[in-house]
Amino acid sequence: MPNYTTSPYFSQEFKDKIGYFKFPLYEGGKGTDQNSYVGGPGIGLFVAQNSKVRKQAEDFAAFLVKEWGDKSVRAAGVIPATKVDTTFSNVQ
């Protein structure tokens, strides 16, 4: 959310409409604490286990995370980790 709430590219009217909510509990569910949150840096993606498009959603999520990670690293000017075969190198 900070990307939207602190960015100068978004109007204050837009920023004022950003928020979050607690997911409702349902009877028989495993979660019992409505004050527990899932989150962290980056993006969170979810797909229902019995979704008709589960495989496509998983493939898309994997693609999105890879692309987002690659572009984030490049945009920050960081050289990504690279495997280099030094077997035939004369590096000391």
Image (cartoon, rainbow, N blue to C red):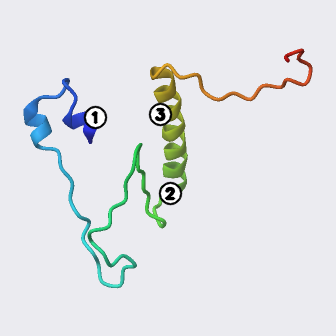
Residue identified by numbered label 1: 3
Q: Please identify the quadrant where the N terminus is shown.
A: top left
Compared to residue 58, the image places residue 78 above or below, namely above
**Residue in the picture at 41% in, 50% down:** 44
In terms of sequence position, does the residue under pointer 2 or pointer 3 come before the other? 2
Where does the image place residue 69, in percent across and percent down from the top left? 51, 34
Above or below, comparing residue 63 to residue 57 in the picture: above
Q: Which amino acid does label 1 sit on?
A: Asn
Residue 40's place in the image compared with 30, above or below, is above
- Where on the picture, by quarter, is residue 31? bottom left
User: Does the residue at mark 1 contact the one at mark 2 (Cβ under 8 Å)?
Assistant: no
Tags 2 and 3 in contact by the CB under 8 Å rule?
Answer: no
Q: On the rendered structure, is 69 left or right of 3?
A: right
Q: Position of residue 54 (x, y in %)?
A: 50, 57
Circle on res. 54: 2
Q: How crowded is mark 1: few (under 14 residues within 10 Å), some or many (20 or more)?
A: few
Secondary structure under tag 1 reads helix
Is 73 on the left or on the right of 45, as rendered? right
Q: Residue at x 45, y 23 (%)?
A: 76
Relative horizontal placement of residue 18, taking residue 47 as reference (left or right): left
Please report the residue visible at 53 percent of the width from the left and 29 percent of the height from the top: 70
